[in-house]
Amino acid sequence: MRFMVMVKATADSEAGIMPSEELMAAMGRFNEELVEAGVMLAGEGLHPSSKGVRVKFSGSLRSVTDGPFIETKELVAGFWLWEVASLAECIEWVKRCPNPMPGDSEIEIRQIYTAEDFGEAFTPELREQEERLRARLES
């Protein structure tokens, strides 16, 4: 099972305050554990929303809104992609994570869809296209 593990933004991360050397070292050690265990597929930190944009879709229209975005608690400051056997295993890994922010912080876990989750709507032609795209990404 694959999961996106999201570090939620805080007022500090949205202000662009960078993590301390101590926190960076602790997270580096944790990331090493994840890689050695074959859990981590990817992971990155994100710039504050003040450097981002949102694109809103309304029928055929598109509108772009520049950041920053107001609801800090709804924003993501960083993420990992993990592959583990279960949600329970994912939770256990998250509980081992150093606190990713100074002060209180929160990590959200969301399972990634698999082809089987889409049922009949994911036709053989669409499956073939997906497999071709994944093969291109891996090369």
Image (cartoon, rainbow, N blue to C red):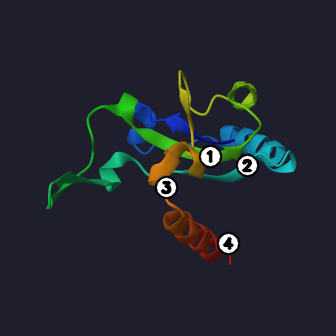
Of callouts 1 and 3, the N-terminal one: 1
Choose mark 4 or mark 3, whichever is in front.
3
Tell me the CA gap for discs 3 and 2.
27 Å
The quadrant the C terminus occupies is bottom right
Above/below status of 36 relative to 10:
below
Choose mark 3 or mark 2, whichever is in front.
3
- Residue at image point 14% right, 61% down: 60
Q: Residues within 10 Å of mark 3 (few under 14, many from 20)?
A: some
Residue at numbered disc 1:
80
Tell me the CA gap for discs 4 and 1.
18 Å
Q: Nearer the viewer, residue 112 or 45?
A: 112
Please report contact status of discs 2 and 1: CB closer than 8 Å, yes or no. Answer: yes
Please report contact status of discs 4 and 3: CB closer than 8 Å, yes or no. Answer: no
* Image coordinates for residue 57, horizontal then vertical, percent: 20, 53
Residue at numbered disc 4:
138
- Residue at image point 62% right, 46% down: 80
Q: Residues within 10 Å of mark 2 (few under 14, many from 20)?
A: some
Q: Tell me the element at label 1.
A: strand
Choose mark 1 or mark 3, whichever is in front.
3
Q: Residue farthest to the top?
A: 104
Q: Amino acid at mark 2?
A: Met
Residue at numbered disc 3:
122
Q: Tell me the element at label 4.
A: helix
Q: Nearer the viewer, residue 1 or 45?
A: 1
- Residue at image point 82% right, 49% down: 38
Q: Amino acid at mark 3?
A: Phe
Q: Amino acid at mark 4?
A: Glu
Above/below status of 66 relative to 130:
above
Left/right placement of residue 105 relative to residue 57 reads: right
